[in-house]
Image (cartoon, rainbow, N blue to C red):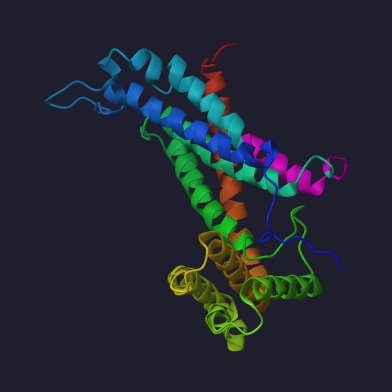
Amino acid sequence: MANPRTDTAPRAVTFVKVLPYILTVVMTLFFVILALKGKAYYLTPIFDTPDAPGRMFHPMHAQWSSRGSIGHTLGVIGTLMMLSIYIYVARKRLKFMRNWGSLRVWLQLHITMGLCGPMFVLYHSTGKLDSQLPALSFWAMVGVVLSGIIGRWLYSQIPKTLAGTELSMQELETEDRRLVGALRKELGLTHPVFEHIDKISSVDENIADTGALGALKFMMRDDLSRFRQIRELRHTLQKENMDRAKVDEIVLLARRKSLLMRKIQLLGAAHALFDWWHVFHKPLTFLMYGTLMVHVIVVVLLGYRWIF
């Protein structure tokens, strides 16, 4: 059988694949610059205080407030970004879009837009949430973002090909044999380090019987302990005076094997957790977009129509 190319397999770097990361870096720099430029306004008290007047009297208010030219523009950009995340949903479900690039890349863009859009909205709001509708929409947005981060981690627990399709158990077992073969090629057939690698890769068979919550606790503990175990493996290999490139290759293969074994053992639990996540995430999403649309309609009716 041909190599199924799981998410643990090496990948060729192309511009399309790194595009989401480039956008993330660019947006991060933009937000830092925005914070520095608007610092004087953002640090001014929202309302008048005995010591200083509020933002309404600040010279930057006309442009940087949520109704100003800059603040309003940030809100429009953030709204468009948050709406754009549904392109990923369409890419998954609509037949005519199935050949529109890698699903994995679309997911990364979905995540990037889902993080950057709310940041634009945060700057747009300037932290002023003194009315119920914007406040409800904002905190629903915060809930969606936090839930999305958790969902991305859960999604990563389900092994997939580079195209984003889920692997069968037979393909997972084939990939495990490929990783074992690669390790034996690097280390030899009977190297003592294999015992260490097997320890990192071992998963208690009874974990799957503890239910979804028990599996979730194990996954989180396992992610933390793997970092320490992989570091110990690296130190063990370095003591043998191995070439650094070879040590890096062995450590990478060992990490992939340990993750793959956990995914194989807890595949059913990962699916259950992901299903439960949808139950929580979707209502928050509907609440966020519902209140957002009402907010946009009210703003337009009040005459704040940006460049139009």
Number of disc labels? 0
Q: Tell me the quarter of the image containing the C terminus.
A: top right
**Is residue 73 toward the left or the right of residue 158 in the image?**
left
**Is residue 299 toward the left or the right of residue 126 in the image?**
right
Q: Is residue 86 visible?
A: yes
Which residue shows up at 53% across the image and 53% down it? 149
**Is residue 1 toward the left or the right of residue 69 in the image?**
right
Q: Tell me the quarter of the image containing the N terminus.
A: bottom right
Q: Position of residue 91 (x, y in %)?
A: 77, 43
Q: On the image, which quarter does residue 182 sit in?
A: bottom right
Name the residue furthest bottom.
Answer: 206
Relative vertical location of residue 178 with respect to residue 189 in this rendering, above or below: above
Which residue shows up at 68% across the image and 59% down it? 7
Depth check: 128 or 24 in front?
Answer: 24
Q: Position of residue 97 (x, y in %)?
A: 83, 41
Q: On the image, which quarter does residue 37 sit in?
A: top left
Which residue shows up at 45% across the image and 75% down it? 236
Q: Is residue 290 visible?
A: no
Which region shows up in magenta? 83-97
Q: Position of residue 118 (x, y in %)?
A: 50, 38
Depth check: 301 or 225 in front?
Answer: 225
Name the residue furthest left.
Answer: 51
Main structural element of the magenta stretch: helix, strand or loop?
A: helix
User: Is residue 255 part of the magenta span, yes or no?
Assistant: no
User: Is residue 85 part of the magenta span, yes or no?
Assistant: yes
**Is residue 280 toward the left or the right of residue 60 in the image?**
right
Q: Position of residue 240 (x, y in %)?
A: 47, 74
Relative vertical location of residue 156 with respect to residue 88 in this rendering, above or below: below
Depth check: 270 or 200 in front?
Answer: 200
Relative vertical location of residue 8 with respect to residue 123 in this rendering, above or below: below
Which residue shows up at 56% across the image and 59% down it? 153
